[in-house]
Image: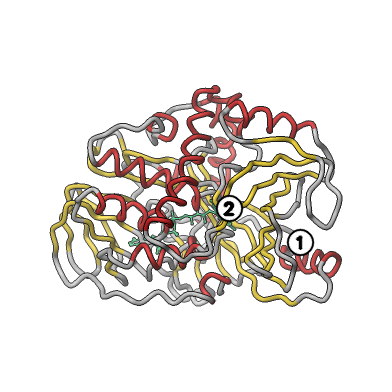
Amino acid sequence: MKSIWTQTTKIPGRNPLPGNKKTEVAVIGAGLFGILAAHYLKEQGKEVIVLETNRIGSGQSGYTTAKITSQHNLIYQKLVNTMGEKHAAAYAMANQQAIRDYEKLIDRYRIACHFEKKDAYLFSVNESEILRQEADCAARCGIPASFVRETELPFPVHGAVRFADQAQFHPLEFIEALSGDLTVYERTTVREVKGHEIITNRGVVKAAHIVFACHFPFVNIPGFYFLRMYQEKSYVMALGPVKELEGMYLGIDKNSYSFRSAGDTLLLGHGSHRTGKCPKKNPYEEMRRLREHFYPNTEEYGRWSAEDCMSVDSVPYIGHFSGVLADWYVATGFGKWGMTTSMAAARIVTAQIMGRRTPYDEVFTPQRFRPKAAASTFLSHAGYSAAGLMSGAMTKVPRCPHLGCRLVYNRMDGRYECPCHGSQFEQNGKICVGPAQESLPFIN
Ligand SMILES: Cc1cc2nc3c(=O)[nH]c(=O)nc-3n(C[C@H](O)[C@H](O)[C@H](O)COP(=O)(O)OP(=O)(O)OC[C@H]3O[C@@H](n4cnc5c(N)ncnc54)[C@H](O)[C@@H]3O)c2cc1C
C-alpha cells in the first residue's frame, strides 16, 4: 500500500543499532512525534538516539492527510461540557501554538515540504445550528473561528465553521529534512523496557530518559493504555487533476468526507470505523462514486488506509508514561489529529525532560481521571475487548499475539485486524501495526 507521500519521498536508509549503547534520551519510534521530540531534545543539548523497528516515517505518519489544524471535528463543545472551559482552551491553545511552531521550524531550517497556510472548514449538508455553536465555543477558547454559509465545495452546504490560518504540508518531506542530523537506528525493534534499560533485537540501550513514540505503546503494565485506548481506521483516495482547493474540509454528517488538495491532486477521506469492525459498504467504492459524480474526467492516483489511537476522553495522552516511573514519557491517543498534536507533544515532553512545566501539562497528562468525559467510550471499549478476548479464547486461529483477541479479516485492505486494540497483519501474517510486536504464524 502506497500513499502519495510514500510515492514521492525516498528517505535515505540508516544502519541498525550496532550493539549496546548508553545515552541521555532514547526515543522509541521514528514517526512524526518521535522525530519532533528527538529534534527539540537535541536542540536543548541532550544526547538523543531514536530506535525504529522499520524505517523512518514508515508508520502511520506516512499515510495521513496531513492537515495541520486545531479543528478536530466537533470537539470544543464536547470538551467544554465534559472538562470545562479552562481545559478546552488549553487544548485549543496547544494546537494553535503547534501551527505557529511548525511555521517557525520550517522557516528556520528552510524545509521544503509544501507547507501552506489554509483555512480549515467543518461542514454539514444537513444542519447548521451545531456548527454555529461549535464556532462560538471555539472562538471562546481563543481560536479564530467563525460560522459561514458558503464554501467552494462542488455541492451546497447548510453551514460551515471556518478556522482561519491553519496549514497543510507533505509529512514525509518534513520528516526527511528534520531527521537528517538525528541519530536514528532503523531495523531496531524494542522488545522490552526495564527501568532504564531498553532491550532490542540488536543490543541493549541504557538511557536516563525514555520516550515512547511508537504509536500504541506495546508495554501493557504499567500505563494500562490497552484499557483506555483503541484504534480507528479511515481510507484515503488521491485523484486528479482537480482545481486546487483554497481550504481544507471535513464533513460532520454520518458517512461524510474529508477534502484537501496537494497541488492539483485532491485527497478524499472517508469511511472511519473501529479497526476490526469493517463497514458494510466499501469506502473506496463510495469514494469512486463521489468522484464519478463530482469529479468526472479525473484519474485515481492512489488509495490507502491508516489508523490512529483513540483515547477514551478524546484528548491525547502526553507526558509521564505512568505515575510510578519518573523517567518514561509518552505521546499517544492522537485521535486522528497527531500531525498537529505531535508538535504540541514534542514541546511538552521536551519541557518535562528539561525539568520545566508547560501550560498544557494538566489537560494532556496520561495520569488524569475524567469519568464524565471517558465513561461511555470506556464501557464500549471494554465491551469490544471482552468480546474479542472471549471469541479469541474459543477459537484456535487467527488470534492477536498482543492479548489474544480473535482477528477479523478486512477485505478492503487484505489485512487481518484486531478489534480490541487495532494491531494489523498482512495476509501472510507479517505484523504491520502494533501494539502487537510479533508476526503471526502462517494463517492462510
Ligand atoms: C486516515 C488518517 C488521516 C489523518 N489525517 C490527519 C490530519 O489531516 N491531520 C492531523 O493532525 N492528523 C491526522 N491523522 C493522525 C496522524 O496521522 C497520526 O496521529 C500520526 O501520524 C501519529 O504519529 P506517530 O509518530 O505517533 O505514529 P507513527 O507514525 O505510526 O510512528 C510510530 C513509529 O514507531 C515505530 N515502532 C512501533 N513499535 C516499535 C518498537 N517496538 N520498536 C521500535 N519502533 C517501533 C513504528 O514503526 C513507527 O515508525 C490522520 C490519521 C489517519 C488514520
Image coordinates for residue 347, horizontal then vertical, percent? 36, 43
The residue lying toward the viewer, choosing from 244 and 123, is: 244
* Residue located at (54% from left, 46% from top): 335
Q: Which residue is mark 1?
A: 281
Q: Which residue is mark 2?
A: 117
Image coordinates for residue 127, horizontal then vertical, percent? 82, 38
Density class for disc 1 (Cα within 10 Å; few <14, some 14-19, many ≥20) is few
Instruction: Give the number of callouts.
Output: 2
Q: Nearer the viewer, mark 1 or mark 2?
A: 2
Query: In the picture shown, does residue 285 fall above or below 347?
Result: below
Q: Earlier in the sequence, mark 1 or mark 2?
A: 2
Query: In the picture shown, does residue 410 fall above or below 311?
Result: below
* Residue located at (84% from left, 41% from top): 158
Ligand 1 under 8 Å from disc 1 Cβ: no
For residue 379, side relative to residue 119 (left or right)? left
- Kindly report the distance in space between the C-alpha atoms of the residues bearing marks 1 and 2: 34 Å
The residue lying toward the viewer, choosing from 243 and 367, is: 243
User: Does residue 368 show up?
Assistant: yes
- Residue 374 placement: quadrant: top right
Image coordinates for residue 136, horizontal then vertical, percent? 68, 28
Query: In the picture shown, does residue 97 fall above or below 431?
Result: above
The amino acid type of the residue labelled 1 equals: Lys
* Residue located at (14% from left, 65% from top): 20
The amino acid type of the residue labelled 2 equals: Lys
For residue 29, side relative to residue 375 (left or right)? left
Please tell me whether mark 2 sits on a helix, a strand or a loop: strand
User: Does residue 333 show up?
Assistant: no
For residue 265, side relative to residue 202 (left or right)? right
- The label on residue 352 is none
Q: Quadrant of the C terminus?
A: bottom right
Q: Quadrant of the N terminus?
A: bottom right
